[in-house]
Image (spheres, rainbow, N blue to C red):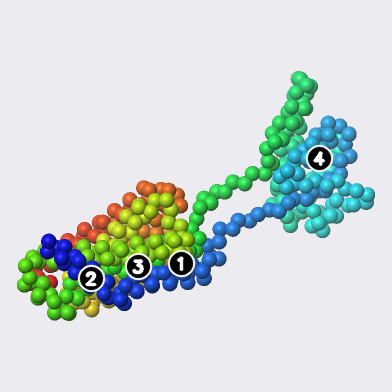
């Protein structure tokens, strides 16, 4: 019961601290809005698109190749490749040189010739690939004609219903935009700021002269310790949940379909942050030094962990930051539905929590006061 009373006391005391309340909620939201809007172009996922391809052609043949090409021309028009026959004195080669068209094709009884512009290499490669496929199919049809002429039309007509151009992305189409990324980054960063609260958890009582009153109360030292630690973890996690929900419903940030897993990662980060701040406060034995060290660590971790700019997590230095563990794990859970990606982040956070909490517990037991 004493633990519960101290737990509730910690919650009330923190809620009455208006400056902390504003800092833990308003600070990440404002940064999220500013960075999300200012750096939106840096997260652009627009892909290069190819407009309609225009090709001139002159059909001087009178054999099956010329007839097959006419059928081929009609089918490619469905995919945005438009063949236009030259009229009068139009010089197809000159039109290609002047970049008026993407290519020029001559069809004769002996074969097909293609002229393409060096300035439109992508379009030229597309035209060349299509014509190569067409000629290969025609050669197959001629081979079939030697065995069974009745099957020629079937070979030439095969796959005409399919598109000649199909786009396939080598990268996942789902990727965070600026607001999505900074919603994750600012939330994980403010979770790390819970270390400041942890560093002053006991020192605040000493500064307010309430530490001695707690010690002479019926509550045991262990009750005081657990009540204050659980209270700090709870209130900081409430701040995180508020920021997540605000960014989700107001800024429309994408938090994925596994919000429970995402919140679990953030909860373990809060555990790690509070225990780290508490452990540092007992190691330094002074509140001012503890807060200075914690603030420096937070700033370095935020900078190299990608709180202010998107980083490449393939490097070794970013992996030293707890932010990088959290951001990478959350991003994979949201955009790749990879729930297993949460395990490394959760494991590292809990590991640091155990180490720092052991330091705090041992130091707390050895002290006469808080």
Labels 1 and 2: the sequence-earlier one: 2
Estimate the spatial distance between the alpha carbons at disc 4 and disc 3, rounded to whole Å: 66 Å
* Residue 46 appears left or right of 274: right
Give how far across and how far down residue 221 sits, in percent: 10, 66
4 vs 1, front mark:
1
Q: Which residue is mark 4?
A: 112
Labels 4 and 3: the sequence-earlier one: 4
In the image, which disc is placed on residue 309? 1
In the image, which disc is placed on residue 23? none
Q: Which residue is mark 3?
A: 190
3 vs 2, front mark:
2
Estimate the spatial distance between the alpha carbons at disc 2 and disc 4, rounded to whole Å: 84 Å
Estimate the spatial distance between the alpha carbons at disc 4 and disc 1, rounded to whole Å: 53 Å
- Classify 10 Å Cα crowding around label 4: few (below 14), some (14-19), many (20 and above): some
Do the residues under discs 1 and 2 have CB atoms within 8 angstroms? no
Labels 1 and 3: the sequence-earlier one: 3
Compared with 74, 307 (above or below) is: below
Compared with 192, 84 (above or below) is: above
Residue most extreme to the right: 88
Labels 2 and 4: the sequence-earlier one: 2
Give how far across and how far down residue 111 sits, in percent: 82, 37
Quadrant of res 316? bottom left
Do the residues under discs 4 and 3 have CB atoms within 8 angstroms? no
1 vs 3, front mark:
3
Compared with 331, 207 (above or below) is: below
Estimate the spatial distance between the alpha carbons at disc 1 and disc 2, rounded to whole Å: 36 Å
Q: Residue drawn at (9%, 76%), measured in percent from left and top? A: 212
Looking at the image, which is closer to me, 71 or 267?
267
In the image, which disc is placed on residue 12? 2
Q: Residue drawn at (86%, 38%), measured in percent from left and top? A: 108
């Amino acid at each position: 019961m004493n633990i519960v009373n101290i737990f509730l006391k910690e919650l009330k005391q923190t809620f009455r601290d208006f400056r902390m309340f504003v800092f833990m909620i308003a600070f990440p939201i404002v940064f999220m809005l500013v960075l999300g809007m200012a750096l939106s172009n840096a997260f652009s996922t627009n892909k290069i698109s190819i407009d309609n391809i225009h090709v001139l052609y002159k059909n001087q043949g009178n054999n099956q190749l010329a007839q097959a090409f006419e059928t081929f021309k009609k089918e490619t028009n469905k995919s945005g490749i438009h063949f236009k026959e030259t009229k009068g004195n139009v010089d197809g080669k000159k039109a290609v040189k002047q970049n008026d068209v993407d290519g020029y094709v001559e069809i004769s009884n002996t074969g097909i010739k293609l002229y393409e512009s060096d300035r439109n290499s992508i379009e030229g490669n597309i035209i060349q690939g299509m014509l190569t496929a067409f000629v290969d199919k025609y050669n197959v049809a001629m081979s079939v004609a030697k065995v069974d002429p009745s099957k020629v039309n079937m070979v030439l007509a095969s796959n005409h219903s399919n598109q000649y151009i199909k786009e396939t992305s080598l990268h996942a189409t789902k990727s965070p935009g600026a607001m999505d990324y900074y919603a994750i980054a600012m939330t994980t960063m403010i979770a790390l700021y819970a270390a400041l609260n942890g560093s002053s958890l006991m020192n605040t009582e000493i500064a307010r002269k309430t530490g001695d009153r707690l010690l002479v109360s019926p509550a045991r030292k262990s009750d005081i310790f657990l009540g204050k630690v659980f209270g700090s973890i709870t209130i900081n996690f409430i701040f995180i949940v508020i920021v997540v929900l605000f960014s989700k419903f107001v800024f429309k940030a994408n938090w994925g379909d596994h919000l429970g897993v995402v919140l679990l990662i953030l909860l373990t980060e809060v555990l790690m942050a509070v225990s780290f701040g508490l452990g540092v406060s007992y190691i330094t034995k002074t509140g001012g030094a503890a807060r200075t060290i914690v603030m420096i660590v937070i700033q370095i971790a935020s900078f190299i962990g990608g709180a202010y700019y998107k980083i490449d997590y393939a490097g070794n230095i970013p992996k030293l930051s707890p932010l990088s563990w959290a951001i990478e794990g959350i991003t994979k859970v949201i955009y790749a539905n990879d729930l297993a990606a949460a395990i490394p982040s959760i494991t590292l956070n809990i590991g640091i929590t155990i180490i720092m909490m052991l330091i705090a517990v041992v130091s707390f037991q050895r002290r006469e006061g808080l």
